[in-house]
Image (cartoon, grey):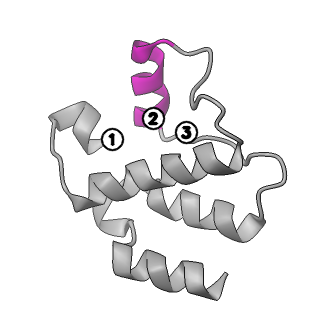
Amino acid sequence: PEVLGNKIYSIKSDVWSYGVVLWEIFSQARLPYAGLNNARVVEYILSGQFLSIPDRCPESVYKLMKKCWEFKAENRPNFIEIIKIIKDI
């Protein structure tokens, strides 16, 4: 959201993108935000919505995705925390 609204790039915005990559992996390479044009994707994200759980995705992995998609960047985990979460999964 901070990239879309203010063009602020950081490791925390990379964490958001990592959550999307996880979603793509567990959705078997489906296109995220399918059916939405760029303007609608921006609106969707800035309104606090996020991608739904892919079929056959473990709830624990989806929980990690949602942590990566926390609206406020400071609430997202860092990559060290993500590694710990993945090891626990």
**Rendered image quadrant of residue 80:** bottom left
**Rendered image quadrant of residue 18:** bottom left
Please provide percent x and percent y for residue 82.
Answer: 46, 75
Please provide percent x and percent y for residue 52.
Answer: 69, 43
Residue at 55%, 16% (x, y): give it: 36
Residue bearing the label numbered 1: 1
What amino acid is labelled 2 in the image? Answer: Ile
Q: Are marks 2 and 1 in contact (CB under 8 Å)?
A: yes
Residue at 40%, 14% (x, y): give it: 39
Q: Secondary structure at mark 1?
A: loop
Q: Secondary structure at mark 3?
A: loop
Residue bearing the label numbered 2: 45
Q: Is 55 within the magenta?
A: no
Q: Secondary structure at mark 2?
A: helix
Q: Are marks 3 and 2 in contact (CB under 8 Å)?
A: yes
Q: Mark 1 vs mark 3: which is more N-terminal?
A: 1
Query: Which span is picked out in magenta?
Result: 37-47
How crowded pointer 1 is (Cα within 10 Å; few <14, some 14-19, many 20+) is rated as many
Please provide percent x and percent y for residue 13.
Answer: 29, 52
Residue at 28%, 60% (x, y): give it: 12
Q: Mark 2 vs mark 1: which is more N-terminal?
A: 1
- The Cα–Cα distance between marks 1 and 3, rounded to whole angstroms, is 11 Å
